[in-house]
Amino acid sequence: MSEKLKNLLVRTASAIVLGVVMLGAIIWSQWTYGMLLALLTASGILEFYTLAEKQKYVPQRFLGIMAGLLLLVLNFAFVSEDISISGEFRLLFEAGLALLLLLAFGMFIYELWRRHESPVANIAVTIMGVFYVAVPISLLCYFPILITESWNSWIIVGYLFIIWANDVFAYLVGMTCGRHRLFERLSPKKSWEGFFGGLVGAVAFGVIAGHLLGGSLWAWGGLALITAVTGVLGDLVESMFKRAADVKDSGELIPGHGGVLDRFDAVLLSAPFAFVYMYFVM
């Protein structure tokens, strides 16, 4: 068996396993969905800090990951139908908000004892990891309730399928007729032909999702368009980080696909834009 075929089989198998696990976690219950988001948050922040360390920065790993997870937990508790923020739970929620505030400013204090060069850069990179990874993933907590009045896990599935469709159609069109480079400095293989092919595929899947899940087909098409464009930009942003760190992949968590940032780079940048669009338009 050739090495190329072996890599293809590994990528295919891991993609199937990842898809089944994610779909199961999203659909099974709110708690499994929350645990999936927590895993992605911790792994994504850790990978971001690893990239930063390859550029001679020294982020505060523990405080950054704790802040990111706490931000996610607070947002999940706010939207979950199984958690009522009242009585003792209200006190816990407010304590969590206070702890998050203290963690943020504690990063400045902790840096006093670390004695590393570039303390400002180290603090900035630590906060940036939380902002780049934990904020967009925390926004995903709201996706199942933004369009419908009650929790609907299939909304997040539809959103992820739009991203998947954009990737697949961009790859297929780019491989067959890609001629003009989209952003050669960061991603030499991306083409304008693939970019527009991905947009068409994403919008088509968005309309299908709208038909299956209900709502305006135009609104779903608009969501798909925004998600696809910002998703491509998210891919380029992560490529920028990896090039600066001189690495091919952000991690090795997903065999054949790299790390969490490699697989979910489109989600990280598209989620905030999709959230705003869904909140005000849908």
Image (cartoon, helix red, strand yellow):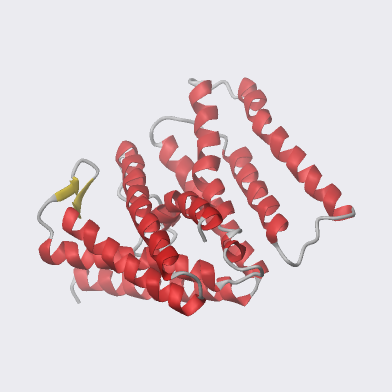
Look at 65% across and 27% down and name the residue there: 110
Q: Position of residue 4 (x, y in %)?
A: 20, 68
Residue at point 21%, 73% (across, down): 5
| Relative image position of residue 157 (x, y in whole percent) | 49, 70
- In this view, 114 is above or below 197: above
Q: Nearer the viewer, residue 172 or 241?
A: 172
> Which residue is the extreme one toward the right?
87
Q: Residue at x 65, y 73 (%)?
A: 29
For the image, the number of numbered tags is 0
Name the foreground residue: 91 vs 39. 91
Q: Is residue 54 left or right of residue 66?
A: left
Q: Is residue 24 shown left or right of residue 232?
A: right
Q: Pick the quarter of the image with the N terminus.
A: bottom left
Q: Nearer the viewer, residue 214 or 184?
A: 214
Residue 236 horizontal side relative to residue 260, left or right:
left
Snapshot quadrant of residue 196: bottom left
- The percent position of residue 152, horizontal first and vertical second, equals 60, 72
